[in-house]
Image (cartoon, grey):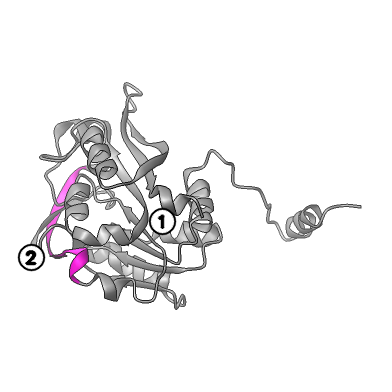
Amino acid sequence: MRSLALVARDVARRFGVDLVRYPTHDTQFRVAKLLGRLEVDCVLDVGANAGQYATELRELGYTGRIRSFEPLNDAYAKLARAASGDPLWSHENIAVGAENTSTTINVAKNSYSSSLRDMLPRHDEAAPSARIVGSQEVAVERLDSRFDEHVAGASAVFLKVDTQGFEDQVLAGCGDRLRDVVGLQLEMSLVPLYDGQKLFADIFGMVTSLGFEIVDVSPEFADPHTAAMLQANGVFVRPEAAQV
């Protein structure tokens, strides 16, 4: 007897759709599995850009709440459209950092490389599509200033941070509320790409000193000329939460 999976795949193919498994070497597949194991019911998506991260989590089966934060106006408009019709996906047009303030963000040509820090030549040389093409005034807010509002009713919170060299400032703005986070996903640079940023070793030390353990590392961005890895994604969990 054929499995239901094979029958479903044949039916889908008749409509021009091919159903395939996400490979276990895919970072987001593993993150989605981890969210299920940790019983996460709220994801804080900091540096959401146009909503790519949250959209992929939905495609991978995550059904809990998502709260996305994106400072760029154009990217935020796309994010809002992506989240429309999803009552469990909310969003705000703000940056997240260590202070409640306003500042200027450097806008990259590819949008997602935009940063509150100045881009260094190494990044520009490795990715011309990330070249800075403008700037925008943005509001910045500490996560702990409205943490209860952001996660209201949640029992297990997962924090994703992709802020192009501003990750340490986002973590600083969580204050003591990081104790209420069961897991983290952070983009970390191995070499300086933005002026003043903390590198992989610094971020790793900061996060592990807060009681998290690393469970996953994967490549994010490599220099196309040398093949040297420039950025990686790290996933961390609280040991007690990982026992669930």
First of labels 1, 2 by sequence position: 1
The secondary structure that most of the magenta stretch takes on is strand
Q: Amino acid at mark 1?
A: Tyr
Which residue is at 19% across, 36% downward?
A: 193
Nearer to us of marks 1 and 2 is 2
Q: Classify 111 as above or below 193.
A: below
Q: Quadrant of residue 201?
A: top left
- The residue shown at (26%, 31%) is 190
Q: Which residues are magenta?
A: 131-145
Q: What residue appears at the point 51 percent right and 42 percent down from the top-left corner? A: 26
Q: Look at the numbered disc 1 and give the secondary structure of its residue.
A: helix
Q: Secondary structure at mark 2?
A: strand
Any magenta on residue 7? Answer: no
Residue located at (59% from left, 47% from top): 22
Q: Taking 134 as reference, is 93 left or right?
A: right
Q: Is residue 137 magenta?
A: yes
Work out whether residue 49 or residue 147 is closer to the camera in this orientation and state it.
147
Q: Nearer the viewer, residue 173 or 3?
A: 173
- Determine which residue is flagged by label 2: 101
Q: Is residue 174 visible?
A: no
Q: Which residue is mark 1?
A: 53
Q: Amino acid at mark 2?
A: Thr
